[in-house]
Image (cartoon, rainbow, N blue to C red):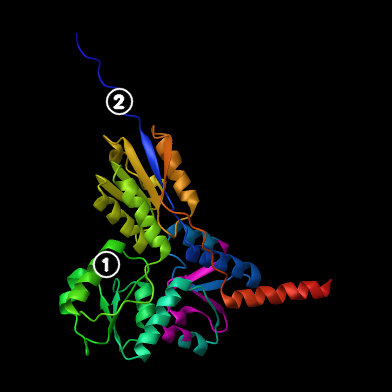
């Protein structure tokens, strides 16, 4: 008697938690929306407020104008600095252009800026682990250009030189791979045994949490889909982490429409997550797309709780308070 064929494995989606917006991104996006309400369009934003195509396009429709150079902003206008932070020279350019500035730099990036200033004042050589050319790295480097050397991963360590091996500190971009950063730090410590570590981890909580969730989820996934833009450092890292965790394939998409149905061939379990600058609506669209193709069973893979929030930029809070006071006075 022929044995019955085994029942086909049921298709499912493993949905990472936490995922999507971090506190710094949420703050920055709300800041642009509040600025448009408070001052009216246009509000200029230097660089994309966050690295997400959908968010930028949505804010453009509301009246935000994104520019790459401060000189593109008309004299006397309002300009907001993106969540990635800017170098001091950008603040100087804005002052020369008589621009009203709103600084939406993520507070966790500002922390790294302050560390760079502190160690430069103490005449340390600063080894900044990060991707050369990334806006955050450009901004941090600008705080102490004569003291900072960029180290773009473990492969860069051999060529690093310092003035005094007893006065060397490492800092990092906030959106890097946790594992690769520690690999780079270990290599630096081997080369410079007296290397000083920052007072607290520079990689942000959201980056760490999202990577941790993907490590757990990726190990059980045939395919991992990361929702995020191709210029988003933290989203790109999630794809890498998924592959390292054991996922057979991992892809980055901005929208559900970018998913290739061929990716699903032979796939039982799809892992799904999103980068720290991705609104949940884009994840929901991917879930709907997958459900329509038989992946309707969704299991949450939760590895952390997040309750961090940041207040709006001080310039915006000041003007919102002033308007509220005027409204009260007029009653």
Look at the image and tell me whether residue 253 can be seen.
Answer: no
Q: Quadrant of residue 20?
A: bottom left
Residue 290 falls inside the magenta stretch: no
Cα–Cα gap, marks 1 and 2 = 41 Å
The foreground one among 244 and 142 is: 244
Q: Quadrant of residue 322?
A: bottom right
Circle 2 residue: 8
Q: Quadrant of the N terminus?
A: top left
Please tell me whether residue 255 is drawn above or below residue 55 in the rendered image. Answer: above
| Bounds of the magenta segment | 62-91
Circle 1 residue: 182
Residue drawn 35% across the image and 86% down it: 119
The foreground one among 209 and 45 is: 209
Q: Quadrant of residue 298?
A: top left
In the figure, is residue 191 to the left or right of 13?
A: left
Q: Secondary structure at mark 2?
A: loop
Depth check, mark 1 against mark 2: the one in front is 1
Residue drawn 34% across the image and 81% down it: 141
């Amino acid at each position: 008697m022929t044995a019955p064929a085994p029942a086909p494995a049921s298709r499912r989606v493993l949905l990472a938690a936490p995922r999507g917006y971090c506190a710094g991104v949420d703050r920055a996006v709300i800041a642009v929306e509040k600025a448009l309400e408070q001052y009216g369009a246009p509000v200029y934003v230097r660089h994309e407020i966050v690295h997400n195509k959908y968010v930028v396009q949505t804010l453009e429709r509301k009246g935000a104008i994104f520019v790459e150079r401060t000189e593109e902003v008309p004299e006397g206008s309002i300009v907001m600095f993106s969540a990635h932070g800017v170098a001091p020279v950008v603040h100087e350019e804005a002052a020369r252009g008589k621009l009203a500035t709103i600084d939406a730099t993520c507070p966790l990036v500002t922390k790294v800026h302050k560390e760079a200033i502190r160690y430069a004042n103490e005449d340390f050589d600063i080894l900044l682990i990060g991707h050369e050319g990334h806006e955050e790295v450009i901004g941090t480097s600008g705080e102490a250009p004569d003291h900072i050397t960029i180290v773009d991963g473990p492969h860069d360590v051999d060529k690093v030189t310092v003035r005094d091996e007893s006065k060397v500190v490492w800092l990092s971009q906030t959106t890097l791979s946790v594992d690769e950063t520690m690999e780079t730090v270990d290599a630096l410590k081997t080369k410079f045994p007296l290397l000083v570590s920052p007072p607290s981890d520079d990689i942000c909580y959201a980056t760490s949490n999202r990577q941790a969730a993907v490590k757990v989820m990726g190990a059980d996934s045939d395919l991992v889909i990361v929702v995020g833009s191709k210029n988003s450092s933290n989203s790109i890292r999630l794809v890498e982490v998924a592959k390292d965790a054991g996922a057979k394939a991992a892809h980055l998409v901005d929208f559900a429409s970018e998913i290739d149905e061929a990716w699903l061939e032979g796939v039982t379990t799809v892992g799904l997550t999103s980068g720290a600058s991705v609104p949940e609506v884009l994840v929901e669209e991917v879930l709907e797309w997958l459900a329509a193709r038989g992946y309707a069973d969704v299991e949450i893979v939760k590895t952390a709780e997040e309750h961090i929030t940041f207040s709006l930029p001080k310039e915006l809070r000041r003007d919102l308070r002033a308007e509220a006071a005027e409204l009260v006075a007029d009653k």
